[in-house]
Amino acid sequence: MSPDVDLTVPLPGSRPLRERLLALDSRLFGFAAARNWPAGRPVLPRLSRAADHGVLWFATAAAMAASRTPRARRAAVRGVASLALASVTINTLGKRSVRRPRPARDPVPAVRQLKRQPITTSFPSGHAASAAAFAAGVALESPGWGLAVAPLAFSVAMSRVYTGVHFPSDVLAGALLGAGAAFAVRGLVPTRAQLGPPARPRAEVPTLPDGEGLVLVANTAAGSTERVRALRGLLPAAAIVECEPEEVAAQLEQAAARARVLGVCGGDGTVNSAAEVALRHGLPLAVLPGGTLNHFAYDLGVEGARDLAGALTRGEAVRVDVGRFDAGGRRGVFLNTLSLGVYPELVRVREQWSPRIGGWPAGVLAAARVLNADRHPLRAEAGGRPHPLWLLFAGNGIYHRMGLAPGRRTDLADGLLDVRVVHGGRRPALRLLAAAVAGPITRSPVHAAVRVPALRLGGVAPGTLLAYDGEVAEVSGRVTVDKLPQGLTVYRPAPGA
C-alpha cells in the first residue's frame, strides 16, 4: 500500500450499528491487551515479523515440497496460489474499502509491540488473510498437511492482536477472506479428491493380503528406493527385484513367468515396458510410481506405496485402454501419449543432457535448442491430403483441463484418442504457445483437436521421430494409431478408499 493517500479518515455520516460494533471491538482489544500471555512473549512477535510479505509461508511451502511426495507438492502449490489471491484481494480492495485506523498502542505492553509499525489501514488483516489462505489451501489438497500447518496459521493471526497492530474483527475478517480465496482457487483448479479415479470398469483380480504372488521390478535409476522400501514394509511376502535400466526388460520377462501379479516401479517408460509384458502374459499390472512425472499412476489414483498396497490387499482393480501404433513394421503400445514432430526431438535432446545436468534443466535446454533450430515442419498425409505439422499429439484417453491448470484423465477406458495438432508455418515457438493456451478449443488458426478411435497417417519421411511414453523411435511411411479397449487390468484404490 502507498502511504501518500490517507485512507484512515472515516467517511462522514452517522452509523449507529457500526459504532456499536467498533466499540465492542475496542473493548475486546483492550481486554486482550491487558492479559498476561507469558507463553506468547518469546514467540508471537517473531512469528508476526516472519510472516511479513509471506516469507514464512513461502518457506513452509518449500519445506513441504522438499518432502518429495506428490500430495505435499500439490498442497504447497495450492497454498501459495491461495495466498497470492488473498494478498491481491486484500491490498487492492479490502484495505481501500474500509477506512479504519490502527488501534492505539498505549494499552499494549512495549515488550509486545513490533519495532516497525504498519502504515496501512487496519481492516482487514493481511497477515491473517495470508495465514488462513495458505492453511486452507493446503488442507483442501491434503488434510494431513493442513492439520500440521493450522496451528502455525492460527498463531500468526493471533499475533496481530497480541502485538497491538489489529483489532480482533480485523483478524476475523482477514481469516474469512483468506479461506474464501482458498475455495476460489479450488473452484478454478479442482483438487484430485474432486476428480477421483473412475469407478468402472471393475476387474476381478487376485487379493494379496501380504503381497504373496506379486513380483515387482524396480528401476533403480528412477529414484525409487524409498518407495520400494515402504512397499516392502507393507507387503512383506512380495518379491521385489531392483535393477539397472538396461536390465529392466529381461527382469520383467523373468518376473512374468512366476508372478500372479506383475508389478513395476519406475517412470512412464518403465511402466510402458511392464504393460507390454503384462499384456503378452495375460497378467494384471501393479504400478508403483517412481519416476519424475508418473502420469499413468497418478491418473489411476496411485500416488505411493500405501495406495498400491491397499488396492492389492483389497483386490481393487480396473480395466484400462491401451494405445497401439504400427509405423512401417515397428509396433508398440502407449499408456499416456504418442507424438510426432517437435516433441520427439525435444525428448531426444533432453535424454542426451539429463545425465549431466539433471532432468528439468535438460528439458529447458532441449526446448530452446529445438525451437531455435533452422528446420521445417513434419509433412504427413491425412485423408489423402498432405499436411505440414509442427506437432501431432495423441493421448490414450481424453485429457481434461482442471480449470486453468494442465489437463489430466478422469476415464482411462473411454475408447478414444485425444488428437491435437499444431499446423506447420513460421515461428514454431509462437504456434506451440498459442496451441497450449487454446487448450481443448477444437479449431484455431494454428491448432486443431479431434477425438477419434483411430488415426492413420501416410507419407511420413524416413527418420521421423516418434515419441511414446517418453521413449523415442524412428519411423517412416504409414503410421496407424488405435486402441485396445479395456485391454489391460491394473490395480488401483477404489474412490474414497
Image (cartoon, grey):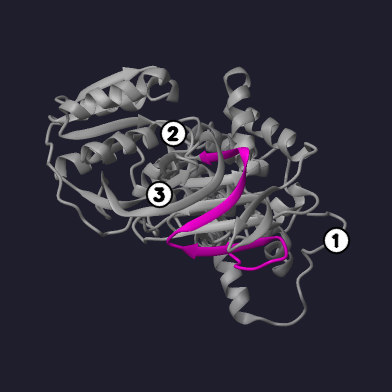
What is the magenta range?
440-467
Distance of mark 2 from mark 3, alpha carbons? 14 Å
- The residue located at (42%, 56%) in the rendering is 397
Nearer to me, 403 or 410: 410
Which residue is label 3 attached to? 323
Q: Position of residue 49 (x, y in %)?
A: 64, 38
Q: Position of residue 125 (x, y in %)?
A: 62, 55
- Disc marking residue 5: 1
Q: Position of residue 348 (x, y in %)?
A: 60, 30
Which residue is label 2 attached to? 269
Distance of mark 1 from mark 2, alpha carbons? 59 Å
User: How many numbered dots are placed on residues in this image?
Assistant: 3
Q: Quadrant of the N terminus?
A: bottom right
| Prevailing SS of the magenta stretch | strand
Q: Quadrant of residue 148?
A: top left
- The residue located at (19%, 40%) in the rendering is 312
Q: Is residue 150 left or right of residue 226?
A: right
Q: Secondary structure at mark 2?
A: helix
Callouts 1 and 2 close, C-beta under 8 Å: no
Distance of mark 1 from mark 3, alpha carbons? 62 Å
Nearer to me, 109 or 274: 274
Callouts 1 and 3 close, C-beta under 8 Å: no
Q: Residues within 10 Å of mark 1 (few under 14, many from 20)?
A: few
Q: Is residue 212 left or right of residue 28?
A: left
Q: Earlier in the sequence, mark 1 or mark 2?
A: 1
Q: Earlier in the sequence, mark 2 or mark 3?
A: 2
Q: Is residue 14 left or right of residue 131?
A: right
Magenta highlight on residue 31: no
Q: Amino acid at mark 1?
A: Val
